Image: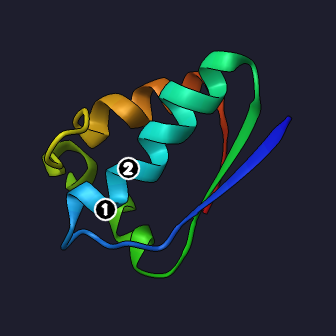
Amino acid sequence: MNVLTILTVGTDDATKASVPIHLAVNGAVEVGDEVTVILAGDATGYLAGDAIAKAEGIGVPPLRDLVAKMKDRATVFV
């Protein structure tokens, strides 16, 4: 199955930004689905500086860990 995730949540809410990536990478990819993640709007703020390294949501892995795993297993469009 092909899964498309569009992330639009910015750096002001790391939990909301991490949840869809967590579900895509630790859910869909793990069961063999092909995942594409698109960063749009405010989510592109994670590409500036060390925003990904600083983003730690509540109840989800740090965004830096999710992105590292995603780079190996998903397609990302900005």
Question: Which label is found at residue 16?
Answer: 1
From this view, report whether residue 62 is shown above or below residue 73. Answer: below
Badge 2 crowding class, 10 Å Cα cut-off, few under 14, some 14 to 19, many 20 or more, is some
**Residues at marks 2 and 1, CA–CA distance in whole angstroms:** 6 Å
Q: Nearer the viewer, residue 30 or 46?
A: 30
Q: Amino acid at mark 2?
A: Val
- The relative height of residue 48 versus residue 58 in the rendered view (above or below) is below
Name which residue lies at 38% across and 72% down. 9
Residue that appears at 38% across and 59% down: 47
- Give 19 or 68, whichever is nearer the viewer: 19
Quarter where residue 22 is shown: top left
Where residue 73 sits: x, y (%)?
Answer: 63, 24
Task: Say which of 71 and 31 sits in front.
Answer: 31
Quarter holding the N terminus? top right
Q: Is residue 78 visible?
A: yes
Judged from the image, the secondary structure of the residue bearing numbered disc 2 is helix
* Residue type beneath disc 1: Lys
Query: Percent position (x, y) of residue 63?
Result: 29, 42
Residue under label 2, please give it: 19
Residue shown at 24% from the left, 68% from the top: 11
Q: Are marks 2 and 1 in contact (CB under 8 Å)?
A: yes
> Which residue: 18% across, 73% down?
12
Outermost residue to the right? 1
